[in-house]
Amino acid sequence: MPPVPPDDPGTEPGISRKTLLRAAVAAGAAVPLLATGAVALARDSARTPGTTLAPTPFCDDGDDPTPDQIEGPYFRPNSPLRTDLAAPGTAGTRLTVGGYVFGRDCLPLPGVLLDFWQADDAGAYDMAGYTFRGHQFTDSTGAFVLRTIVPGLYPGRTRHIHVKAQAPGRPVLTTQLYFPGEPRNSTDTLFDPALLMNVRAAGGGKEATFDFVLNVDGTPGPTDPPTDPPTDPPGGTWAAGRAYRVGDRVTYGSAAYRCLQAHTSMTGWEPPDVPALWRRE
């Protein structure tokens, strides 16, 4: 989207629609869902016509990848591969979070690693096991679905869900997702309105949407030229297309690596490039 013209009263040049929407959310304004072509907004508008929801980051004007945030003290590596973090009978309000992961060019990113962790209904993190911890990968359309509960509150923080996102062979984005309408949003010094999910009631639980925009290029198009000259991967025991388990050791080039996350390897996830999956020894 082009910047707001300089002669538009009450605005400054260079301010995008996304920036204005985020400012409105931060001020507590009700923001209508517009037919802008933005993926997240259009999806929510179609499902809940006439409602007013805070916008998630959306890919329409080429700016503002999803902001990063601190990891915090409760991250643990080696989370299990799963999309459902809430076991049957677990206390708490059921929550389903769905969305897409895009690159800067608005193309969906398949195979993105998403590692989620959060507090339980009482606001506690499991530091001995992997309750409310798990990782998954976006599908061929760049989509993901997380089934969990609404996290509880604990001193000093508003409700939030932690996530690490990593496209194959690219740096890790560490960030947090927030809930609209929470009283503690205004007092939590880490809260960022750009990271608000769209949340609605759904039966006895809640549904939320959020689209990540990573600071990477999207899936190469058919006109992209091949690498010239072609590059061959270094030798070693690591290979694409293999199912690796936590603790597996491989060599790649002249270095040894230990697997941190169970996954099926693919080209672009070579051990030196994906620290969320492999640790050099």
Image: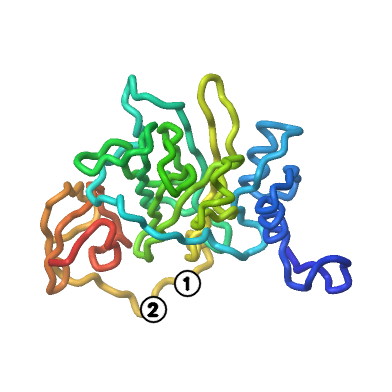
**Label ID, residue 225:** 1
Q: Secondary structure at mark 2?
A: loop
Give the image quarter of residue 4.
bottom right
**Label ID, residue 241:** none
Q: Is residue 127 above or below residue 233?
A: above
Callout 2 crowding tier (Cα within 10 Å): few <14, some 14–19, many ≥20: few
- What residue lies at 14% left-to-right and 58% top-to-bottom? 258
Q: Is residue 240 above or below residue 48?
A: below
Q: Are marks 2 and 1 in contact (CB under 8 Å)?
A: yes
**Label ID, residue 228:** 2
Tag 1: amino acid: Pro
Distance CA(mark 2)–CA(mark 1) = 8 Å
Q: Is residue 102 visible?
A: no
Comparing 57 with 89, the one in front is 89
- What residue lies at 40% left-to-right and 60% top-to-bottom? 70
Colouring: rainbow
**Residue 18 percent location from the top left of the image:** 68, 58
Comparing 92 with 86, the one in front is 92
- What residue lies at 25% left-to-right and 53% top-to-bottom? 265
Image quadrant where one finds the N terminus: bottom right
Q: Secondary structure at mark 1?
A: loop
Apparent side of residue 54 relative to residue 128 in the rendered image (left or right): right
- What residue lies at 37% left-to-right and 24% top-to-bottom? 91
Tag 2: amino acid: Asp
